[in-house]
Amino acid sequence: MTMTITRERVEDFLYAEAALLDEWRLDEWLALFDQERGGYYMPTTDHPDGDHNTDLFLIADDMPKLRSRVEQLLSGLTWAENPRSRTRHMVSNVRILDRDGDVVSVTANFVVYRMRFQNIDPYIGTYRYKLIPRENRMFTILERRVILDLEALRPHGKVSFIV
Amino acid sequence: MPEGSNTADLILDDREDGIFRVHRSAFVDREIFEQERARIFDRSWLFAGHVSEFPKPGDFVTRTIAGRPVILSHGEDGKIRVLMNTCRHRGNLVCRDHKGSSDFFRCFYHGWIYGTRGELKSVPGEEAYSEAFDRDALGLEPAPRMHNHRGCIFVSFDPEIESFASYMGDALAVFDNTLDLGDMEFVHGQFKYSMRANWKLLVENSMDGYHAVYTHERFFSHWLQSEGLTRQPATAPPNAGASNAPRGTVPLGNGHVTTNYPSPDGRPAVNRGYLEKHAGEDLLKFRAGLVDRYGPEKARKVEGGAGNYLIFPNLMVIDGWWVFRTFYPSSPDYMEITGWACLPKNDPPALRKARLEWYLAFQGPGGFATPDDVEGLEGCQMGFATHKEVEWSDISRGMKGITAGGPSELQMRVFWREWHARMTTGKHAEYTGD
């Protein structure tokens, strides 16, 4: 099955994903991942090309960890997100980089604003996705890599929500 | 600070009745902050980095230490130097990369070039200077004092400071216990983050056993449980089985203090369950290696670690997660934090990966615990806006040798006693225990 994947279709998916995050529908967001092989990664700000097997990462969630992360966020015990932040995900510059069998590699730019206790902290960077097309113009997320352009998480201090 | 008074009145330390209080102006007052810079950060041995960050001649790392931009330079002569990152001509930074490798540092402003030893190699149009212009005296200024302890680089901006060994006192043995885990390196990647909070709150928090099951309930009741590693229900007396109260916390002199040394028998390293589950075979081999090297007793101490400990004023080592952490205030209500993972260089891949997973699960701005610490300390700082009405924080827990009811706050009192002595007398506290 090799149907053509258009940028528009990828954009629709990323916008829908962003809406799930901003609306804190994290269970639905979690369901977008390949439940066996999926992963969510965020390298450190000083070492964006790192390998989570050998280097320090901010986030390196396989599915058990990611499921736990979402459970924790929804449990009310994540004080850093209870009361939860207001966030707004802005996604742009979406590009399909290549396609290897079933897997489509996508990159997009983002600015995510977090509003909390009178502070507005912008998280700026690039998403790198590995997506598997499925029916209804949707995709399954095999890998979601968030590469921050920030030189440091200052003054942001934390990445307690899903960027 | 208390009306018409000075830093002497910022601490209420009543050993007889068992009451210890800190005046909250210590967290918000700008004058106190300026005094801390002059009396503490300008007068201490400060952790600057690890040689593994710039391992080869020509390698360098730049960072800011106590407000000063510095270059950690691995000279072409093989020597490690800490150089002030400012051109001797008119001030520009001579190195503007976070890290790299180079034969020289060139100030782009007027093209002055320095070697990796800091020497001034060339000045464009040098003929324009008189004979009194001494190029040899205009190398990059080294930090007044530098000490390399087993690859750990410390600096002091006080030329008259006591020797590193004397400053460290009993903390040196504890620090060595951490470094004895193997041929240690700082892995690639740093946690560079911040808190909108006073730096002393992070000193307290980084070795606070009392907050763990409350602030970090999600880590214990959700994540550890999802891993099948639950230690105890959160409703049990706080940290009842892992208390630092009975014998763990040891003042080490000069404000240094550890929460768990020597690691008591029967209290395995906090990471052991996770490592056993995910890299069990490697861990057995690793442990056997420690026993071969040190004998069973010392091997147990090294693997068990020293809990969370402070090298005064701002190096926190958290042995259970192999964390090195420093933090510097840039104002009373804001600090910049750097965190590293210090791991054995020769770990087999599965053990390295398991250690990193354990580290990430708790530590750092994206972990399952640190964000809640950030939240808590920022909340304290917001609360301190009431410091004129609510003047004192209480840090009396576990005084009078009381060990019931879980963790003591002795380790924080040790810090505050040294802090207070430095701020008032400029000298070390004579005695920091209860």
Image (cartoon, coloured by chain):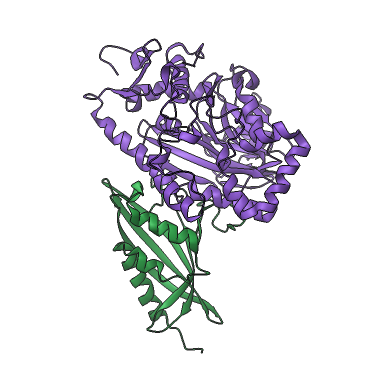
Chain colours: A green, B purple
Image quarter of residue B114: top right
Q: State the image coordinates of residue B164 (x, y, percent, origin top left).
A: 63, 22
Q: State the image coordinates of residue B373 (x, y, percent, origin top left).
A: 40, 41
Q: Which of A126 and B210 is in front in this view?
A: B210
Vertical position of residue A94 compared to residue A3: above or below: above
Vertical position of residue B404 compared to residue B92: above or below: above
Q: Nearer the viewer, residue A88 or B288?
A: B288
Give the residue at x 24% y 25%. Answer: B390
Residue at the limit of the structure toward the left, as seen here: B389
Give the residue at x 54% y 30%. Answer: B309
Residue A66 placement, left or right of B349: left
| Residue B55 appears in view | yes
Q: Which of A114 and B284 is in front in this view?
A: B284
| Residue A91 appears in view | no
Q: State the image coordinates of residue A123 (x, y, percent, origin top left).
A: 39, 55
Give the residue at x 59% y 16%. Answer: B160
Vertical position of residue B109 compared to residue A125: above or below: above
